[in-house]
Image (tube, rainbow, N blue to C red):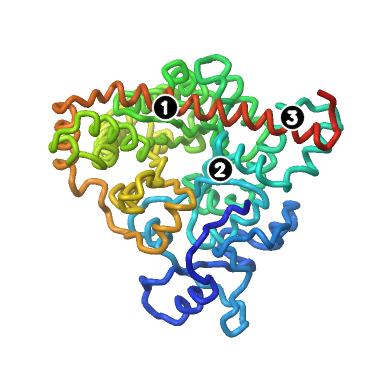
Amino acid sequence: MAAAITRPWNPITAAAAAATTSSPRSPEPRFAVSFGGGRAVSLSKLASSGLSSSPTNHASLRPLIIRCSQSGGNGSPIKRTTLHELYEKQGQSPWYDNLCRPVTDLIPLIESGVRGVTSNPAIFQKAISSSDAYNEQFRELVQSGKDIESAYWELVIKDIQDACELFESIYDETDGGDGYVSVEVSPELADDTKGTVEAAKWLHKLVNRRNVYIKIPATAPCIPSIKETISNGISVNVTLIFSLSRYEAVIDAYLDGLEASGLDDLSRVTSVASFFVSRVDTLVDKLLEKIGTPEALNLRGKAAVAQATLAYQLYQKKFSGTRWEALVKKGAKKQRVLWASTSVKNPAYPDTLYVDPLIGPDTVSTMPDQALQAYIHHGTASRTIDSNVSEAEGVYSALEKIGIDWSYVGNQLEIEGVESFKKSFESLLVTLQEKANSLKLVSL
């Protein structure tokens, strides 16, 4: 599976239509697909890094992967998309929530305005189990004596390193403010404080890229892990945040870690806090339907955005004042809030429901194919995150009054999230064992 976006229209027709209009906001999607000397990556850099500039499976490429313009045959890139506006006008960084081989399939997305990548065990489970692009490296690893789990990490680390190369210029241009690629520690360590710290150090050392984020879950046992990892000068993407109380604990862990680092220059230790959105509505909507009153049913589809809006208010509060200003003097950067789980699970809801209402400065929105496709096509680039704070407060309170226990929601979603990633991780190891057996590399 290529890391691209499926679209219901002919990409060449759409590209040609976008190229002929002078409006910066035409109704057709516009994709920047330059492969020569683009700001994000150049062919010479690809060659020097050992990455191929030509994907290996052209038959599987989806419509966004346009190798050159076929309008007039001059290869002119289409330069602007809503993603560029989102970053330049509103200060929100659009990231892509997917990663698979060939990693060079990210190039059109980078040229279209994507500024970072997130991955997780479920993403790698899908990528590795559904593609033969990993077979050659996997065969070599197992034949060299690697066990299945060690081979898995080698596959993952290569993808992360290659993706980091592609985003390195964005990292440099923003002085370490953007251009990150995230890789998660084993989900089996979600309850292991010390094990998570050691895994974070191990991954950081093996990936050995300036623009890598080590993902650590925001479970209670891992809050101290976040502090210690940050104090060791390792940049962290804190994942699986589902409640305001846990989010505040994550911010405090980041601040504590910066203070404990002993570093005079904190500018290279950064972090994002991945606050999950759509999964909140998935659970809360079920609870509201069980309550079944008209008032309860009228609140469906409102919980997630309301809580996220309040999370941004908490972000602004925590990253201000005397404590924060003292860290800023040492070069500290804010731990940006990252909106995760942005794809719509309920088809009755607008497909940009978890992107459009959460736009604001110093934030990240990581979008999988579905959400990214929708946003590029008809998303807005207006500041919305704090335009309806009082309404969000009202929704949050109304949900409490009607019987929604926000603490239960956060805890339950955390349990489900950890278990889901564990299941993906374990399933992939089984798949790799079966693949090794099918290739007659190891015996049962």
* Depth check, front residue: 364 or 430: 430
Mark 1 Cα within 10 Å, few/some/many (few <14, many 20+)?
many
Q: Secondary structure at mark 3?
A: helix
Residue labelled with disc 1: 254
Q: Is residue 359 visible?
A: no
Q: Secondary structure at mark 1?
A: helix
Q: Nearer the viewer, mark 2 or mark 3?
A: 3
Identity of the residue drawn at 54% across and 24% down: 232
Q: Is residue 396 above or below residue 218?
A: below
Name the secondary structure under disc 2.
strand
- As drawn, the residue found furthest toward the bottom would be 72
Residue 288 percent coordinates (x, y): 23, 32
Question: Which residue is disc 2 drawn over?
Answer: 181
Q: Residues within 10 Å of mark 3 (few under 14, many from 20)?
A: some
Q: Amino acid at mark 1?
A: Tyr
Mark 2 burial class by Cα count in 10 Å: few <14, some 14-19, many 20+? many
Measure the C-alpha gap from mark 2 to mark 1.
19 Å
In what quadrant of the picture does the C terminus appear?
A: top right
Q: Which mark, by number, is residue 433?
A: 3
Q: Amino acid at mark 3?
A: Gln
Residue type indicated by callout 2: Val
Q: Are marks 2 and 3 in contact (CB under 8 Å)?
A: no
Q: Position of residue 224 (x, y in %)?
A: 45, 17
Residue 254, how many percent across, how many down?
42, 27
Q: Is residue 292 left or right of residue 155?
A: left
- For marks 2 and 3, give the CA distance: 27 Å
Lower position in the chain sequence, tag 2 or tag 1? 2
- What residue is at 26 percent from the left and 31 percent from the top? 321
Are the two marked residues, 1 and 3, in contact with CB atoms closer than 8 angstroms? no
